[in-house]
Image (tube, rainbow, N blue to C red):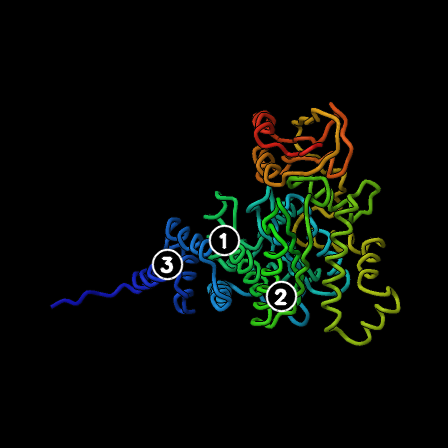
Amino acid sequence: MTTKKIDHNEGEEQRAINAIRRKLIGKKLTYKEIFSIVDQIAKQRLGDVLTTYFAASGYSKGFTKEELYYLTKAMVETGEKLHFKGIVADKHSIGGVPGTRTTLIVVPIIAAAGFTIPKSSSRAITTPDGTADDMEVLSPVTFSKDEIYKIVKKTNACIVWGGSFNIAPADDVLIQVEKPLFFESYDKILVSIMAKKIAFGSNHVVIDLPYGNMVKVRTLKDAQILKEKFEYLAKRFNIKIRPLVHRTDEPAGKGIGPILETREALRVLEQKPNRPLDLEIRSINLAANLLDLCLKDSSKKLQEDIKKNFGNCFGWATKILQNGLALKKMKEIISAQGGKPNIDSEHLNPGKYSFKLKSSKNGIVKALNSKNITIIAKLLGAPQQKGAGIYLDKKIKDVVKKGEAICTLYSENVYNLKGAEKETETFPLYEIE
């Protein structure tokens, strides 16, 4: 008599499938069920179809707060984790707004202030590029766990691609199945961010949470719900968090695409006269809030010194930027990550093929369509083509004359440029009245 050998992996896969089936009909899942799903996704054993079913179940049915905790915990537990001593700062944006590359400014400010900030960043999901795509213009972003420790030990910081090693691997698989649809569920955004913050050892986090008609989170009500969920998860994982909710109708800065966005961030760090002031203001606000969060758990002496010398953390962040310490720190980070630290913003040139999109009438810019900006920028070749993107010559409330350039399209490929140029009629970037 022969006995059939039980395949453990097959059993785990079936358990995950049963759990997905239960979630699709609206049942609440246990930690064991959620862990089995996440574990099988992380090991890439479910395939795209079943993984998409799970992603869709979260979008349509949503998760309870307890399930969100289980999902975040499972994502962390099925991957690698980093550990740093003391206060570990981090900042993350919900995303969905093309441009607005604050991370490249905030990270060096925080590190120059003396706090540890190992930044795990994503590549493009629902926008033309992610922070990792932009940082890659300046230095490599793919590192092992040991290499990240060395970079952070040397500079207090790093700006690396979160998918470069096994950090919350299930999240990266889910991102890939969601990408073609240009959406992420709010719960998935929440879990994705928190899992990677926890895995990277962060314990003091500021969340940039924009809402508006053209971004991921549409209404103030949804933003407030998401804010409460961030605070709930942070409490469960013993993390100090500060979600900053604000209305957003257009990008901060004018550059869309890896080189154009990176150039704008560098101009702020360099304090060039042509720097985008709205991007600078947004970055200082985020940095100041993160410094304030960290300072509350710092020594009394440091707290007193900051109050005496700068008044508050806004003054502190502004001074670090204005006196060149943030730029110096950014050059250290670029160097430690194997890039060229002496690069100047004016050395960063977009794709050689360009087209100036002109206004068909006189008027005032009433709105910018972020979704269409994303579509056109991707048609131009972003983020794979670092020089592809859009420069917004005009923004909301700017006066426009008929025949005047409202934006410039750039590509490294003439065919991409021609295709994108044609599609601006189908996907208009501007609303002018």
Cα distance, mark 2 to mark 1? 19 Å
Judge whether residue 141 can be spotted in this image. Answer: no
Q: Nearer the viewer, residue 119 or 101?
A: 101
Name which of mark 2 and mark 3 comes first in the sequence: 3
Cα distance, mark 1 to mark 3? 25 Å
Q: Residue 125, percent across and down?
A: 55, 47
Could you tell me the amino acid type at mark 3? Ile
For this orientation, the residue located farthest to the right is 308
Residue that appears at 59% across and 34% down: 376
Q: Residue 379, percent across and down?
A: 56, 33
Q: Residues within 10 Å of mark 2 (few under 14, many from 20)?
A: many
Q: Residues within 10 Å of mark 3 (few under 14, many from 20)?
A: few
Helix, strand or loop status at disc 1: helix
Helix, strand or loop status at disc 3: loop
Could you tell me the amino acid type at mark 1? Asp
Read off the residue under disc 1. 172
Dot in front, 2 or 3: 3
In which quadrant will I find the C terminus? top right
Name which of mark 1 and mark 3 comes first in the sequence: 3
Q: Residue 351, percent across and down?
A: 66, 32
From the viewer's perspective, is residue 159 above or below residue 383? below
Q: Nearer the viewer, residue 261 or 186?
A: 186
Could you tell me the amino acid type at mark 2? Ser
For this orientation, the residue located farthest to the left is 1
Read off the residue under disc 3. 25
Read off the residue under disc 2. 202
Return the mark for residue 246: none
Q: Quadrant of residue 209?
A: bottom right
